[in-house]
Image: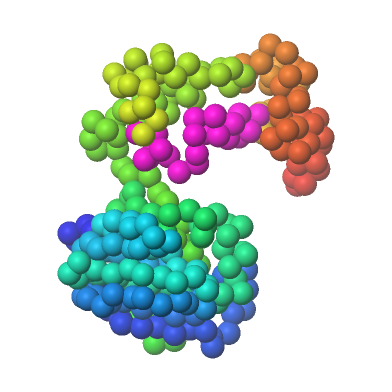
Amino acid sequence: MDKSFNGMDFSSKHVAAYERRFPLLPPVKTIGYIPNKKQRIIQSFSNCNFSFVLSGKGDYVFRGKSYPVEAPCVLLQWPGAPMNYGPDPVWEELYLIYPGEWMPCLVQSRTFLPGNPPVRPVRSVTELHAALERLNRECMNPDPNADRIDALCWNLIVSSFGLPAETGSGDEVFRTIREFLAKHPLSGEVNIDRLARKVGMSESALRRCWAKNEPSGPFRAYRDSLFVRESCRLLIETQLPVKEIAGKTGFSDVYYFSRKFRLKTGLPPSEYRKRHLRDLPQ
């Protein structure tokens, strides 16, 4: 963990009974902080838990497979499944406990995926550190606001997916990859061999670098997200005809552009524009 992180100023905060005026986010039940955890956990839970390992290391055994745990990272525990994890010899942990009945919502949010490995590395320590400090301040309030605590816990979870600041050669390579993918016409397939040569990597090393730094998925998924974002932006922020928007995103065939847009958004471009412009104040 960042050397400037000085820990939390509380050991446990139970907020399940606090009134929520704006029940939009999953309501956290309990927040706990264990600065020197030594005990191994072998049990099942009835809740959905996020355990942030802030310093130290250990392992997580699940379905017969052992996953290394090394800070900073997030461990997931979901209802009903036997969990077996612990420090070696000690780690620092902050945990969030959510009601088990909120599991469908958490799964839908894609922050809590029981089908994936139960250990996920945290990429941006700086972002996580800032989220922890904000949560700590609110929890130390004599009369904490439960809605704000829910929002801060959610911010903490989301911050754990943040990308690291670009500080080293590996980050520079990743930035080059993203720039290449963004500049490549969004209508065509990515020339992976050409990209690998550009950054001086083998194709397998290139894919590993991408998977390590980009949570959105493989190259195609990232480029599809760029296509949707840019197409939607041009449809709403400009008055360009659909044919010109197709050209700006790399499509010489407007019908192919429209088919792909409908496949990714569920609407034809003209209908998407009509619906969203209708919602704008005049």
Left or right of residue 48: residue 20 = right
Looking at the image, residue 142 lies above or below residue 21:
below
Query: Splitting the image into 4 quarters, where does residue 89 fall?
Result: bottom left
Residue 114 forms part of the magenta stretch: no
State the extent of the magenta-drawn residues as a range.
Answer: 209-231
Residue 137 % position (x, y): 35, 74
Secondary structure that dominates the magenta span: helix
Looking at the image, residue 105 lies above or below residue 262:
below
Residue 272 % position (x, y): 77, 36
Left or right of residue 22: residue 134 = left
Q: Is residue 142 visible?
A: yes
248 vs 175, nearest the viewer: 175
Image quarter (top left, top right, bottom left or bottom right) of the N terminus: bottom left
Residue 219 forms part of the magenta stretch: yes
56 vs 264, nearest the viewer: 56
Name the residue located 71 percent from the left edge and 30 percent from the top edge. 261
Image quarter (top left, top right, bottom left or bottom right) of the C terminus: top right
Left or right of residue 57: residue 97 = right
Query: Splitting the image into 4 quarters, where does residue 76 fall?
Result: bottom left
Residue sitting at the far front:
64
